[in-house]
Amino acid sequence: MSVAHGEPTSFWRKYIFSTDHKVIGIQYLMTSLVMLLFGGVLAMLVRLQLGWPNHYLQETHWAHRIFVWMEKIQPVGFAGGIMDSGYYNMLFTMHGTIMIFFAIIPLLVGVFGNYLIPLKIGAGDMAFPKLNMYSYWLIPPAITVLCAGFFLQGGAAQAGWTSYPPLSKIGGPGQVCWLISILLVGTSSIMGAANYVTTVINLRAPGMGFFRLPLSVWALFITAVIILLATPVLAATSVLLLMDMTAGTSFFLPAGLIIDGVAQANSGGGQPLLWQHLFWFYSHPAVYIMILPAMGMVSEVLPVFARKPLFGYHSMVYAIMGIAVLGFLVWAHHMFASGMNPTLGTSFMVSTMVIAVPSAIKTFNWLGTLWRGSIRFTTPMLHAIAFVSMFVIGGLTGVFVASTPVDLYLHDTYFVVGHLHYVLFGGSLFGIFAGITFWYPKMFGRMMSETLGKLHFALTFLCFNGVMFPMFILGVAGMQRRIYSYMDYTHLAHLDGLNRMMSYSAYVLFAAQLLFIINFFWSMAKGRKAPENPWQANTLEWATSSPPPHGNFPKPLTVYHGPYEYSVPGRKDDWLPQHIRG
Amino acid sequence: MRQRISRVAALGVLGLLGAADAWALGGSGARIWLPETVTTTGPDIDRMFYVILWITGAAFILVQGTLLWFLVRYRHRPGQPAGYTHGNHIVEIVWTVIPALILIYLAISSQEVWARVRGTPPPAAFEVEVTGEQFAWNVRYAGVDGRLNTADDIVTINQMHLPVHETVLIHLKSKDVLHSFFVPQFRMKLDAVPGLTGRLWVEATKTGNFEIACAELCGLGHYRMRGFLVIDTPDAFQTWLQQALAEQLGT
């Protein structure tokens, strides 16, 4: 459990196979930002098809020229200048998989878990630095295996990010790659989580009681517990499907399956719904893996820039715990229309309605934090406010799909796509942007440009709503998700105008991310040098240089207060760092 | 400056929504919203949808309004320090209990509708079997013997006829992968799961031509797995059925 390892001097040990949690955090950051961009490119291709369903295009249309040009890069997917429907299925499958497993989860858990936990609890490093290094180094092979699918016959996985059998079972080698990749990334997650839990329990600085932990640490700690309990289930179910695909077992295939006129030799005794139960037993808690850390970071950023203690610290902590426990009891709300027993639907509806309560509590406490604050609209603060505002939309639209009868209509329509993007983009990603812009000075020792940051925020916020809000309307109109063309259906044929508007928004949204990339790299070279504590914040990571040295703190720190002592009456400064006796 | 940014942002959102609305109407003049509903249970589901829309709509305006108001009212002004409070137990209880009560109410009223729609089906006047396969709907009607799954059944592909004002029980199956039987005007969908037989009942209230969509990803042709549904008057339905029977006997 010793963390007193000397600073390595060789380039390989220092920057590549490093055991320093800060280097690993930045490795995760770079890797998952590249994957975020790649996932974005896939989404842009999806929007190309949805905005201009191409077999309806005239040859003179500019979008047609793009399809023809794409044929040069992807001759199979765009044969004859028309996107193939299987290629379209592959695009949204890989978009979802990459965004969830290789962008959002590693950005939240990998980056901030690694970078922040030791710094914020006053530790020199993680409890198991080597395990931490292994956890990161499973990610590049996982990405390689996943993306290898693109170059195999039949392309990458095409069965949706949920990979429901029997469709996934009859997928090609791309689907096998998908399963192996998920196994690798899941193993990496479990290693990281074991490390976080141990670190938070054992390596807190003197005086850092559990109820003096910053909320981001609380959120990451509880998230790690969820990962430890849920991810093994995903791993197990992936192994079962892998066996069905490669070893002739039949865990998910019922008897007498006839696919494309061919009786399936090995089918019998299996149950497609089993996959859905096991998959969502992981993947619903995974939704909270993808939102709790963002909630934690936002709970950190709001008090700093409102110069006010966090409202209701204890209820915020209990709400996180409540979400974590209830998160394990709601999985089958993804299955109201799956053919499972409708009585089961009732119990899962009730647990789902109940889990909305802790989310509401958190929202009201964020508002309470802003109340009577002295709000500074910095870039991280704007992202954090957008998080609160967008998460509210994500949460409220969740009530529609939690109601069993309403979900019977809205399930598997664009309403669900809108709902999940308001939670995962409007929530998680704005939280991530808040986190990156807030801790960038600590990570890289330079300040980011506020002008570029605000411009990036404004465009992202506007265009995000421009592309995601209409999804609710499409869903209400009955547009199913995952369809390559909606133009053949009479109840959908009038949706092309709205879809085009969404595609335009998506393109501006994508282009706006260029501002973030420029800001990120330009500031690294040319940004103003960051002082130790540029935001005048209380938590321990600001009590060391930017960036912190190997081992984090020159002298061990002692903690005297909670993390949110801002504007304490009778003090000259409006902040009171945790390690200063006040 | 900061205020101006947020004001421009708010205006932008409204502008975008307005543009979206205008654009949505531009194409065909049809408003993009719930399609008409043609079953006895559809209006119950719609009522539940609107109840939730009103409640969440009110919560949305309340929360976003408060947020905006706080952002303007409590923006940083020199010489005005922030307040100092760690919270308040009474407000915590209030904002825990009120959402809990509303959500319990929604759960109970949803359950009423759910029990009716997906509970034990009422006695069926007519039964039909629908089997999904990549990428078509096979619809099976009982032949002269009046029983399903016998040699004289009538099977149509992607053509479904149902009588109006009669309780119809649909047995839902799949040959290969998951599909989902979705008729937007019925306000319901149910997955067709290989190895299981799903049961779905409807009573149509209106005649007309509708479409059956597949709502569960089922492969390359998922987007074109489209069936046609005709809801006929009982007489017209019987005529169609007899004709189909005669055709079958003729061949």
Image (cartoon, coloured by chain):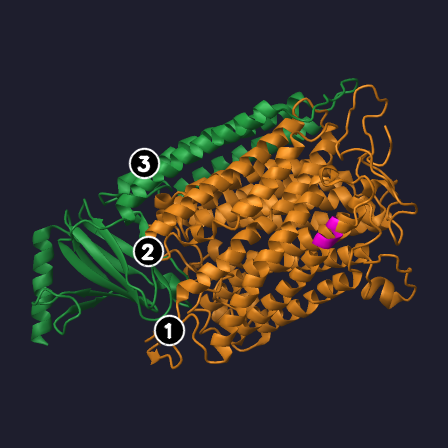
Q: Quadrant location of residue A449?
A: top right
Q: Which residue is mark 3?
A: B47
Depth-wise, is mark 1 or mark 2 nearer the camera?
Answer: 1
Q: Position of residue A57 (x, y in %)?
A: 44, 59
**Is A562 included in the stretch rendered in magenta?**
no
Magenta stretch prevailing secondary structure: helix
Q: Earlier in the sequence, mark 3 or mark 2?
A: 3
Q: CA distance from mark 1 to mark 2?
A: 22 Å
Q: Chain of mark 2?
A: B
Q: Secondary structure at mark 3?
A: helix
Q: What residue is drawn where x is 71% and y is 47%?
A: A515
Identify which amino acid the numbered label 2 is placed on.
Leu
Q: CA distance from mark 3 to mark 1?
A: 41 Å
Please provide the residue range marked out in magenta: A197-201
- Relative to residue A167, is residue A326 drawn left or right? right
Q: Nearer the viewer, residue A14 or A205?
A: A205
Q: Is residue A362 above or below residue A60?
A: above
Chain B image colour = green
Q: Chain of mark 3?
A: B
Identify which amino acid the numbered label 1 is placed on.
Gly
Local crowd size for mark 1, using a 10 Å CA cut-off: few (<14), some (14–19), many (≥20):
some
Q: Which residue is mark 2?
A: B190
Q: Which residue is mark 1?
A: A269
Q: Position of residue A83 (x, y in %)?
A: 48, 66
Chain A image colour = orange
Q: Is residue A47 above or below residue A379?
A: below
Marks 3 & 1 on one chain: no
Q: Secondary structure at mark 1?
A: loop
**Quarter of the figure that contains the C terminus of chain A:** top right
- Relative to residue A93, is residue A145 drawn left or right? right
